[in-house]
Image: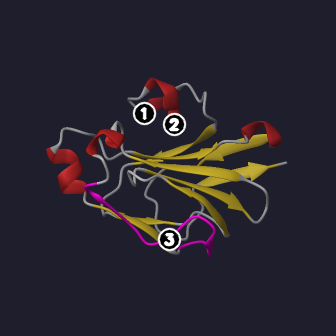
Amino acid sequence: PLSQVSDPVFASESMGKGAAVEPTEGAIYAPCDGEVTLVANTGHALGMMSDAGCEVLLHIGIDTVELKGAPFTAHVNAGDHVKAGQLLMEADLDQIKAAGKAATTMVIVTNSDDFKSIEGTSGAVVAGASLVKLSK
């Protein structure tokens, strides 16, 4: 649950509701079909607008902006249209952890107020599986 993330900004859901993942591999996949709206120059964050009108922020790690892009490799650019399950980014989890940072990855619906409910799933997550369920 997002409420259990060690960063108080994400845990408070002030940026939106969603879910968090403790990654076991460094591949970050698209959670939905949509357009990439932002790839942070530091690689630690990526924004999307889903085809269904959901604004999604993928934030890789906690305080990883301080790593200035070193552990991240983007495979998409702003303006690209992607499909759910498509590789977006790779992150060197060992490098993140060696820097003393958590690799916890947040998936935030930044336009949460547009939805009646947003529920994160629990348990193991695999690419292409639903992580967050939305209802209008």
**Residue wearing tag 1:** 5
* Residue lying at 25% horizontally and 55% vertically, measured from the top left: 70
Q: CA distance from mark 2 to mark 1?
A: 6 Å
Residue 41's label in the rendered image is none
**Residue wearing tag 2:** 2
Q: For the residue labelled by badge 2, is the local secondary structure a helix, a strand or a loop?
A: helix
Q: Amino acid at mark 1?
A: Val
* Residue 115 position in % (x across, y down): 80, 43
Residue 76's label in the rendered image is 3
Instruction: Please tell me how crowded label 1 is: few (under 14), some (14-19), or many (20+) other residues with Cα within 10 Å.
Output: many
* Residue 82 position in % (x across, y down): 61, 74
Left or right: where does residue 60 sit relative to residue 67?
right
* Residue lying at 40% horizontally and 55% vertically, measured from the top left: 43
Do tag 2 and tag 1 residues touch (Cβ < 8 Å)?
yes
- From this view, report whether residue 47 is shown above or below residue 82: above
Q: Which residues are magenta?
A: 70-85
Instruction: Please tell me how crowded label 3 is: few (under 14), some (14-19), or many (20+) other residues with Cα within 10 Å.
Output: some
Q: Amino acid at mark 2?
A: Leu
* Residue 108 position in % (x across, y down): 59, 44
Majority secondary structure of the magenta segment? Answer: loop
* Residue lying at 47% horizontally and 52% vertically, measured from the top left: 40
Instruction: Confirm whether residue 104 shows in the render.
Output: yes
Q: Given the current orientation, which residue lies at the most extreme right position?
A: 136
Q: Is residue 77 shown in magenta? A: yes
Taking depth in this image into account, of 107 and 55 the one nearest to the observer is 55
